[in-house]
Image (cartoon, rainbow, N blue to C red):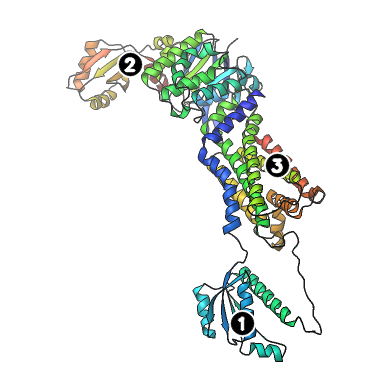
Amino acid sequence: MNAVRVNSIIKTYGKKKEITALQDISFEVKPSELYGIIGPDGAGKTSLFRILTTLLLADSGNATVDGFDVVKDYKEIRKRVGYMPGKFSLYQDLSVEENLNFFATIFNTTIRENYDLIKDIYQQIEPFKDRKAGKLSGGMKQKLALSCALIHRPSVLFLDEPTTGVDAVSRKEFWEMLKRLKEQGITILVSTPYMDEAGLCDRVALIQTGKILSINTPQGIVDDYKKPLWAVKSPNMLQLLNELKERNEVEDIYPFGEYHHLVLKNNIKREELEQWIKQSTPEAVTVEAVRPDIEDCFISLMKN
Amino acid sequence: MKQFLSFIKKEFLHIWRDKRTMFILLGMPVVQIIIFGFALTNEVKNSKIAILDYAKDAASTSLITELDASRYFEIDKNLYSYDEIEAEFKKGKIKLALVIPQQFASDLQHFNKAQVQLIADASDPNTANQLTNYATAVIMDYQKRITNDRKLPYTINTEIRNLYNPQLKGAYNFVPGVMAMVLLLVCTMMTAITIVKEKEMGTMEIMLVSPMKPQMVVIAKAVPYLVLSAVNISSILLLSRFVLDVPINGSLVLLLFESILFILVSLSLGLLISSAAASQQTAMFISLVGMFLPTVMLSGFMFPIENMPLALRIVSNIVPAKWYFTIVKSVMIKGIGLHAIWKETLVLTGMMLFFLTVAIKKFKIRLA
């Protein structure tokens, strides 16, 4: 049995259903899988999570979580899932300990009962247990929210953009915590706009404007990328971009860090490429063949 | 049950940690009672008057002394010509002028009839009315005294007795009014705001994805405000009894029972508003415009309902405070029992059931 099964979900907003948030989404998540929903802002990630956590009703299609229907059995689902919304949603005027205690009681459990599950995470914020939640730093808020979402040992954990607005070190720690939770048998659905985090998931669904572009393991997605990809750099990056855009051989070119990533229609040798770039751009150009990452795949899928 | 208690405890913590709001909620009734009791009063006390005495005889002097001695008036100025009167009124210091014509005493003695003139500043009609009434009463008293030893052919004496409030104290009217107002503000507005706040902060989103029943969330939020209101009622009753000397003539138990009924009506109204409002501002606006103003205007506390046009009289029936105001006045001031106010009690009970049913029906178990 799949931990989460989503079948042809469509969700629209507005009186005349003029805004489409999700267009015919289907996917499945296996038990104790760390599943990433990767996509930019406005792709429909939050709508999807709210439908799965029984907070919103889909226009059509159906979904189950832990074998329960999200519409019919919403009460069952609410007992067994953990949900961490994108916006920090704990009581700011309650202390760290009071928040955790409160959520434990609401879910009919105690901190002691499931302490082993949250121990790694909670230990880091325990020195501040008397501090008001509103006065914590971004990373600590995230840890507290995760502790609260975990305190009742959920079978499926929904994390909506948990690392947005969190510093690089805390993000790394956060993903390590998720890996450990997964080992405890908890299925985790996590959404993120950061492509570099996709590689940390078991499987990812790339989502854009309410449509799933591709579902695969991170490695599988990269392996599917068959086109020749080059990184180019020159002292005048904007000019380089504009000029290469006009060439027939070029399928796509886009800024990528300090380089431009250049997608060609056909395989050519490095010398050949250097040659024809020099024809239009007299300045010194560095050219290197690169391996694609998830972001390149995403951009390529988006263009199709 | 443990969930429910823990939720209530959390709610108390919210209130306790927001000290400013808590002091406003607990201090408001005290301040209102004191302001209404000592500052905002429409009772006439020591009004300044001017005297234009053309007679200056024994009779006029003793009449003036009589006026000055009463607690309603204080003689501000003695005038010497008719033209000065208007000038004095324009200065705005005096509210009333008494003109006594020449030969006042001799007219009284020889013709058995004399005239005095009262000139009032009627830019405030109610005060002018009251002042002339009081002045006339004082003058009549004086007349009665000097005619006491003589037999008059025909006289009708009106003897007035003001039942339930012999001293015509304003407090007898505003204490019930303030009770209705405070309970409505604390219960309706604060309950509505606090639930909408959970929506606004996003905490409702988490609460919904939990085994806690949504109705429980809402009811648990109302409990602390019920307690706060009980504290407020006690402080209002204590203040009015021991500071303003307003007696509780009827049964205290009945009064408290009716107050709790009204609190429940207000709380369910607050719950209803919270399910309709999306932001704290909207909730506050609906509570103030939709509840507070009708309570002040249409409960009979500020303006008598009997004098209103038919349409407003009909509308006033849907204002819960109107019924509560009548109940409190009957029980507290007139000292009558449930047999006389069962109709009002029934109306409030009906309102509570209606609002509570609609509020729970309308409560959203999902976000949209």
From what the image shows, is residue B305 above or below residue A268?
below
| Secondary structure state at the residue bearing disc 1 | helix
* Dot 1 or dot 3, earlier in sequence: 1
Q: Amino acid at mark 2?
A: Lys
* Mark 2 secondary-structure assignment: loop
In the image, B138 versus A238, the foreground residue is B138
Residue B110: image quadrant is: bottom right
Spatial CA distance of label 1 from label 3 is 58 Å
**Which residue carries the number 2 mark?**
A265
Same chain for the residues under marks 2 and 3 in the image: no
- Say which chain tag 1 marks: B
3D distance between C-alphas at marks 1 and 2: 119 Å
- Residue A60 locus on image (x, y percent): 60, 25
The subunit letter for the residue under badge 3 reads B
Using the rendered image of the protein, determine whether residue A15 is visible from the camera's viewpoint: no
Which residue is the site of mark 3? B260
Q: Horizontal and vertical percent for residue B23?
A: 54, 42
Determine which residue is flagged by label 1: B61
- Residue type beneath disc 3: Ile
What is the distance, in whole Å, between disc 2 and disc 3 at their CAs? Answer: 79 Å
Residue A118 image point, x, y percent = 51, 14
For the residue labelled by badge 3, is the local secondary structure a helix, a strand or a loop?
A: helix
Q: Chain of mark 2?
A: A
